[in-house]
Amino acid sequence: MKRTDNAEEIKDQALTLFLTGHETTSNLMTWIIYVLMSNAQLLQICREEVDRVLPNEPITSLKPKLIHPFYYLPFGAGSRTCIGQNFALLEAKVILAMLLQRCNFELEPGQKILPESRLTLRPKYGLHAKVTKHYLLFIVVSLVIVSDFVHSYPATYCIRFDTDVKGASNPIIINITQKWAPIGANHLFEVISSKFYAVPSAFFRVVPKFVVQFGISGDPQQNIIWNKPIVDDPVLMSNTVGTLSYATAGPNTRTTQLFINYVNNSRLDSLGFAPLGIVTTGLDTANGIFNPTPGDPNGVDQDKYSTQGNAWIRINYPQINFITKASITYDCPVPSNY
């Protein structure tokens, strides 16, 4: 492993380790509890095994049927298997044993349990359960396992976009505040943490004195993976200068496309565009982005760029600017007037 003395890189690596360790184990526990709640006989077998103080080799041998053998890979596979796999499995067994000894589980009726594969496989609409004290049924507690609880997201974080904008001395750094638009902020955290920006991504629409739009991956495969709309957030902030919002094609159509407001576009508020962050550094860089389609406010053909990627856009728009790298950081305080 390459040695680094860069404090920011060390912090990012530590955060990645924390999030991946939490994400994989919490997902594993969520699906285990779901399977047990769906099969009373299996739950009883597991409980009896726990009561025998768990032998070295568990006897339940649960082998869920999957659409594909590699559909659920919380720890990866092959030479890149997660180094924390054994610890995570040990941790999961201890947690499961404690839960089975102390709790009874009952799946809340009427739920739609739909697996959604993004960074990991999670219940798209959460998983709701009623939990009662084992052996002391008069003590009742309610537990709701929902995606935002099982998968924690930062209340605030910053996105750093390095660019190839000519003459730019600063990256574009945007403070994202979860409470402004929780669904959008959490979704964007996942996008930035994925491979979506692993290759350069073009600023494909520049409308002077209005907005600059981006958020199509230069890798067509990533656009397929992330073409899953999220529901809208209520508009709590205004589309003022420097704010960041999702581009949409109507209600509940947000995916990955974003725009930065060049001017005060508060008229967009009533149309449902909910800002989720604001540029704290590099607004001059954003204003210096090359306009690939002067005279045409629609920008480049988004469908062609989405399906044909950077190979297509570089040939047709050789001067277009790109996001060369996207990363998450935590050192960009939101302006005091917000």
Image: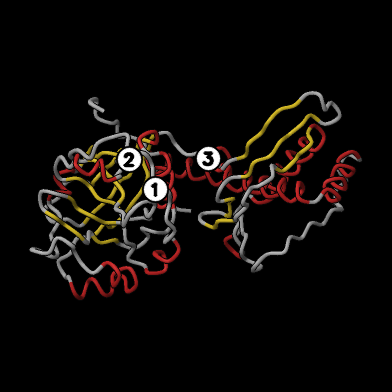
- Mark positioned earlier in the residue sequence (1 or 3): 3
Residue 323 lies, with reference to residue 21, above or below; the image says: below
Q: Which numbered marker is on residue 318?
A: none
For label 3, the SS is helix
Q: Label 2 to label 3, Cα distance in Å? A: 17 Å
Is mark 1 in CB contact (under 8 Å) with mark 2?
Answer: yes
- Residue lying farthest left? 295
Q: Which residue is mark 3?
A: 148
For label 1, the SS is helix
Q: Label 1 to label 3, Cα distance in Å? A: 14 Å
User: Can residue 6 be seen?
Assistant: no
Q: Is residue 46 left or right of residue 19?
A: right
Neighbourhood count class around disc 1 (C-alpha, 10 Å): few under 14, some 14–19, many 20 upward = many
Q: Quadrant of residue 144?
A: top right
Q: Is residue 120 left or right of residue 154?
A: right
Q: Which residue is mark 1?
A: 188
- Mark positioned earlier in the residue sequence (2 or 3): 3
Q: Amino acid at mark 2?
A: Leu
Q: Amino acid at mark 1?
A: Leu
Q: Which numbered marker is on residue 276?
A: 2
